[in-house]
Amino acid sequence: MAYSHKQKLFAEFMLKKIGISNPDDIETYLQHLEKLYGRMVNFASHQDYRSNWKYSVSECVDALKKEIDLKKTFDNIALTEAKHTLSATEIASFEFCPASFAISKSFVIEYPSGEEFTETGKLLHERLLAARTNWHKVDGVNFSSNDLDVSIIRSCELVFAGHQDPKRKFVNGNWTGVPDYIFRDVQGNYFVVEEKFHYKRDPVKKDGYMGYDDQIGEVYDDAIAEEGKKEQEMWSKYRGHFFSNHIVQIASYILNITDYTIKYGYLLYWYYDNTDNEPYIHKVVAKKIIPDDQTKALYSNAVEGINELKSSGNATFLIDKLNMRKCAGCVVNKYCGHKTGRYKILSFPYKRNYLSLFFAPFPNELRKPPV
């Protein structure tokens, strides 16, 4: 499974051309691309037109090709118009990665990464999951979490749903924000709920797929089954790792929305997989966010960092905090030069020169033999 030998050689070559030289970083980046984009693909058999399911990482290789093509003509990347407002999602973007924030505020992003995940998130948002937790009656999802049994939300009054009214924005000075939901609990307190959707292969696949052989079709493999049981057990005990950028986003709503007195918030992570190209939820975890000193400091540090970057036009980029898994999953990674670890300064607006390509020898094994 995963990359073939030649696919791996070609992918490594492209990452070196992009500018990543550390072998461990290259390996981590490719592994995470595979987790995101590797999947079973249905190929039609040329012999008898039967379905032929095979595991493919071609989307991973294609993503790197698109980045190379984009950076070959980086002078053609359109610039955005300067905005004087600062949204909750932009503050969260800075907390996620200052380079990602600068890129998003500088360029028109015509080729975002992970568009299919974004579209799936929109689809699932439209189902108002937090407000309709009776899904567990259909899909068998255990909705209990370490912080909350989210079915309790059904007893609260839904006051606002951002995805039902996308034109509605909350404004406070130059700040703007649109939370997923605002509820009023049984005590009369208002709280926000922010949902995030994460693609995670379901350890208990609905189709029961265990393996595939080109000659005999679907097969049951004891070793794969045993490994699957271990993963299922670990996943059943998982209670969530909540990212600081999402916490900052909720803090932003709590501290800036003035139409309602927001007392607290909930961050929900919904994990989904696909069956026949249809997403289904197989786990949810939640975290309660309160505006304590630690949460306020996290939010303030992000806002201060943005203001300093904008006013000075540059900032120190902390290379030692680079995380290749985050970089591989970043929406604007095709436009980023800082993931290479070559730049210690981050400019604002983001300089196109950061997108320069580098020399890398083409693997001999991939060269076509002379005719």
Image (tube, grey):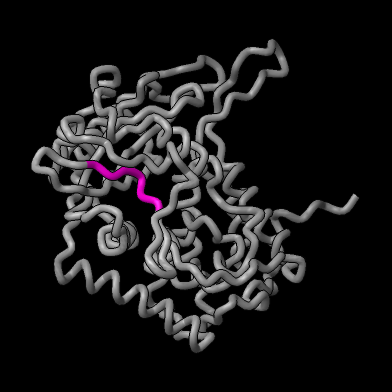
Q: Position of residue 7 (x, y in %)?
A: 61, 48
Residue shown at the point (38%, 24%) measured from the top left: 210
Q: Is residue 180 magenta?
A: yes
67 lies left or right of 183: right
Q: Is residue 309 above or below residue 263?
A: below
What segment carries the magenta color? Answer: 178-183
Residue at the far front in the pictured view: 259
Residue shown at the point (52%, 72%) measured from the top left: 84
Q: How many marks?
A: 0
Q: Position of residue 103 (x, y in %)?
A: 56, 68
Q: Nearer the viewer, residue 14 or 183?
A: 183
Residue shown at the point (23%, 74%) measured from the top left: 297
Q: Position of residue 45 (x, y in %)?
A: 67, 18
Q: Is residue 298 magenta?
A: no
Residue 223 visible in rendering: no
Residue at the far left in the pictured view: 187
Q: Is residue 249 above or below residue 62?
A: below
Residue at the far bottom in the pictured view: 312
Residue 152 in which image quadrant: top left
Q: Position of residue 201 (x, y in %)?
A: 38, 36
Q: Nearer the viewer, residue 308 or 279?
A: 308
Q: Nearer the viewer, residue 36 or 168?
A: 168
228 lies left or right of 343: left
Residue at the far top in the pictured view: 48
Residue shown at the point (26%, 48%) measured from the top left: 192
Residue 312 visible in rendering: yes
